[in-house]
Every structure is written in C-alpha cells, then in structure tokens.
C-alpha cells in the first residue's frame, strides 16, 4: 500500500516509522499518557515501541489498523489511529498527544482529518472511546455536524450519511474501564 499523508491547516498526519521510535517512547512514558492508554505499560521500552510500529504495515494491508503520527512544524506531537478487528466492524479511533500540545485543538483537527479520510475511502463508521471526562471526539467537518457531549463514550459516523454527522451514546458503567 502506498504512503498516505493527511494535511490540515496546522498538522501533517503520516505513517509512524521506525525513526519515530525514540520520540514515541519518550512521550508514552509520561504517566499522564500511559495511564490513559490500555496497551501501553509504564516503562515502555524502545524495543516494545518498535515492535508496535512494525505491526502497522500489516494492519494497513488488512485494512484493520491505520496509525498516523501527528506532526506540527515537523515535530511529532502525538499519534492517532483507526483500528477495527475485522473489515465488517466500524473503526475505533484512538489518539494521544504530548502534554505540551494539549489544549490547542490538535486532537479535534487530527480526528476530523481521520474521519474525512475514512469517509473518502467509503469507511464512514468510526467510534471514539472516552479517555477522560473532558475528552470530546471530533465531529466530521460539515456545517450540520455536531460534536458529542463530554460524557459520550463513543461517536459513530454512519457509512450511509451523505453529510458527515456524529451519533453519541452516553457513558455507561459497562463501557467505562
């Protein structure tokens, strides 16, 4: 599969490469990051990060995992990915940013680019797991789209939607944790 690069007003989303291993490891070893990620332990090693990066090509080939580095001015500031177990499932979109990039709207911007890319490919079903009470999944870029309330656990962009919209479900005890 060819290289995919998505550009927004301020960001570039590109495939994560082995050269990113050090920076990714540095960021995910911040307790403010790894405590919010289900698959990243405290003390993640560069070898473990590299192993994760090397799984991305197979995920792209099977259309089950699309992971992008988020860059601002050429510096890696985070990662966003769309994952699903099978091609019959909707994509779940997850993301994290280096703490110095928090509060600037980058996840919304990157998430919107991801949703629009999925829609352009015909894969308009994506969900956003809640990572904190203040996390808001991005709405697809459309004048009629709505952003989800902070308490939402996931948002889905329906595949059949002519105009991207989001559907939200409130958090439930079964979905948290």
Image (cartoon, rainbow, N blue to C red):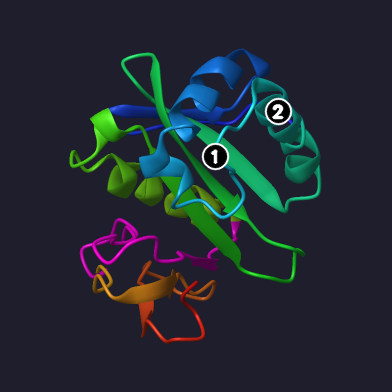
Secondary structure of the magenta portion, mostly? loop
Task: Identify the residue position indicated by label 2 in the image.
Answer: 2
Measured from the top left, where is residue 101 in percent x and y? Answer: 26, 32
Disc ID at residue 42: 1
Measured from the top left, where is residue 116 in percent x and y? Answer: 44, 51
Mark 1 and mark 2 in contact (Cβ < 8 Å)? no
For label 2, the crowd category at 10 Å Cα-Cα, with few meaning under 14, some 14 to 19 and many 20 or more, is few
Which stretch did the figure color magenta? Answer: 122-146
For label 1, the crowd category at 10 Å Cα-Cα, with few meaning under 14, some 14 to 19 and many 20 or more, is few
Mark earlier in primary sequence (2, 1): 2
- Decide whether residue 20 is among the magenta residues: no
| Secondary-structure class at tag 2 | loop
Image point (61%, 13%), residue name = 19
| Secondary-structure class at tag 1 | loop
Measured from the top left, where is residue 16 in percent x and y? Answer: 59, 27
- Left or right: 61 with respect to 13? right
Image point (71%, 30%), residue name = 48
- Residue 6 visible from this viewpoint: no
- Left or right: 58 with respect to 107? right
Q: Is residue 60 above or below residue 94?
A: above
């Amino acid at each position: 599969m060819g290289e995919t690069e998505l550009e927004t007003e301020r960001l570039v989303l590109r495939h994560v490469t082995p050269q990113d291993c050090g920076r990714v490891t540095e960021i995910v070893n911040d307790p403010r990051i790894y405590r919010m990620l289900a698959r990243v332990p405290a003390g993640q090693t560069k070898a473990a990060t590299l192993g994760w990066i090397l799984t991305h090509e197979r995920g792209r080939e099977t259309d089950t995992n699309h992971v992008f580095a988020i860059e601002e001015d050429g510096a890696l500031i985070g990662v966003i990915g769309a994952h699903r177990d099978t091609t019959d499932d909707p994509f779940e979109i997850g993301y994290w940013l280096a703490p110095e990039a928090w509060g600037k709207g980058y996840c919304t911007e990157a998430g919107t680019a991801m949703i629009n890319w999925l829609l352009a490919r015909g894969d308009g079903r994506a969900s956003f797991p809640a990572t904190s009470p203040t996390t808001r999944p991005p709405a697809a870029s459309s004048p009629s789209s709505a952003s989800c309330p902070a308490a939402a656990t996931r948002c889905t962009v329906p595949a059949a939607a002519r105009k991207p919209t989001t559907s939200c479900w409130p958090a439930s005890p079964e979905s948290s944790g």
